[in-house]
Amino acid sequence: MNIRIKDDTEHGNGTIYSFINCTILTMDNEDHYYPSGTIVIENDRIVDIGSSQDIVTRGHVIDMGNKIVLPGFINTHTHSPSPLFRGMADDLSLMDWLNKKLWPAEKNLTGEIAYWGTSQTCLEFLESGITTFADQYFYSESVAKAVETSGLRGFIAPSVFTNGSPETKDTIQAAVDFIEKYKGKEENTLIYPCIGPHAPYSCSSDVLKAVVEIASSYDLLIHTHISETMDENREIYELTGLTPTQYLDSLGILDQKVLAAHCIHLNQKDMEIFKEKKVRVSYNPVSNLKLVSGIMPFKELREKGILVSLGTDGAQSNNSLDLIKDLKTGVLIQKQQYNDATFISAKEALKMVTINGAKALDMDHEIGSLEKGKKADIIAMDMNKTNMNPLHRSVVSNLHSAIVYSADGSNVSDVIVNGKILMKDRQLMSMKRQEILKQTQKGAEVILKKAGLL
């Protein structure tokens, strides 16, 4: 990256950057595309964007030649301390994985270890262009502290269980305490409090009713898992005579703003409820494949106008946290599922991890596309990398295809969140990589040894 600094004293105390010579994919409603564009940001917002010949540069001028510039990627489902459990329980079905490996190991988690595990997730997200993510886990204050340190934007949902968590027996109170601490402070912290009832099979009706009351009182997004496996569907049907979707709807959960992960085993009535209640779906293809949970019915959801975004899930069930790699996998298995090579274009796919992700979090007025007035959450991808060449930048569809089908997270060269440069030419500006890796390794060994898994 070549940096040329101009005198910007006339602009006051604000930080101003002009990114020039960009190949810009805005991902906005009009799908504006600038093969040679300029973006000007002041403090945390985009104040100008367009063809370079039409934009007056000011402030710190940064040459982004040979880079594709687009909105930061948005990951709508993960469990942030999860690198601590990476590779410890592979090749198992979901319920065996949970009951025999993951939950026993999680009992040994502490707030400090959760902080370092989350720090490594943030590091991996940053290095692969994820600027915003939706988390559901416990030790939420430790998670939030790590996210704040990283500079990323986090939608943090304390997990709620009937039988408590490794952190506390009263997960409802822990969630309320967290919400009270962060609600109304989002602009300063980049932490957006949510609430996360784990799943219909791990939360009683009383707990779910309490979640409804909390979500309504604080105007929160509910982040939960729905119909991840057929076993879940059978269990809930045996208890209630309803599908998980219908059960949650009967308790008022779906009358709130809901982000639902997985949503694989839905029937037609379930999908009609999703449509009516405007449930947002987070598609987690790699985790679903690895746990052999099934394949989400994307075509049926899309035909009903249900919003679909993309999530990695956690590193304990995915291993990788590279959202753009997961996007390719997710698109290809859907094409195979419907025997239709034309199903989901590269442009549609890219929207899943940008503007659709923002819509899933009620943040499309602020992030998810590059537009004047929006937050400056921006990434750049290096067009000189071998895996993206030859690249015909004059053909916008070729750029979409290069990102979705050829690229991976290592192609991301620069990351800006809320107007702050967090990574520049693959050099981290906000995180101490080796210290994070060292502390996460140490914490993981403590957990696994105590659980008898190491």
Image (cartoon, grey):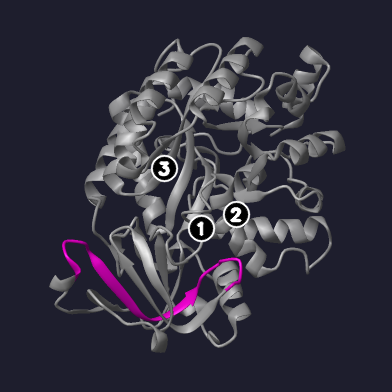
| Residue 17 colored in magenta in the image | yes
Image quarter where the C terminus lies is top left
Name the N-terminal-most of marks 2 and 3: 3
3 or 95: nearer the viewer: 3
How crowded is the residue under tag 2: few (<14 C-alpha within 10 Å), some, or many (20+)? many
178 or 411: nearer the viewer: 178
The residue type indicated by label 2 comes to Asn
The residue type indicated by label 3 comes to Gly
At x 41%, y 42%, the residue is 154
Question: Which residue is tagged 3?
Answer: 154
State which quadrant residue 417 falls in. bottom left
How crowded is the residue under tag 3: few (<14 C-alpha within 10 Å), some, or many (20+)? many
Residue 386: image location, x then y, percent? 46, 79
> What is the span of residues highlighted in magenta in the rendered image?
11-31
Residue 151: image location, x then y, percent? 31, 49
Secondary structure beneath label 3 = strand
Question: Which residue is tagged 2?
Answer: 356
Residue 12: image location, x then y, percent? 16, 65
Name the N-terminal-most of marks 1 and 3: 3
| Numbered mark located on residue 379 in the image | none
Q: Nearer the viewer, mark 1 or mark 3?
A: 1
Q: CA distance from mark 2 to mark 3?
A: 16 Å
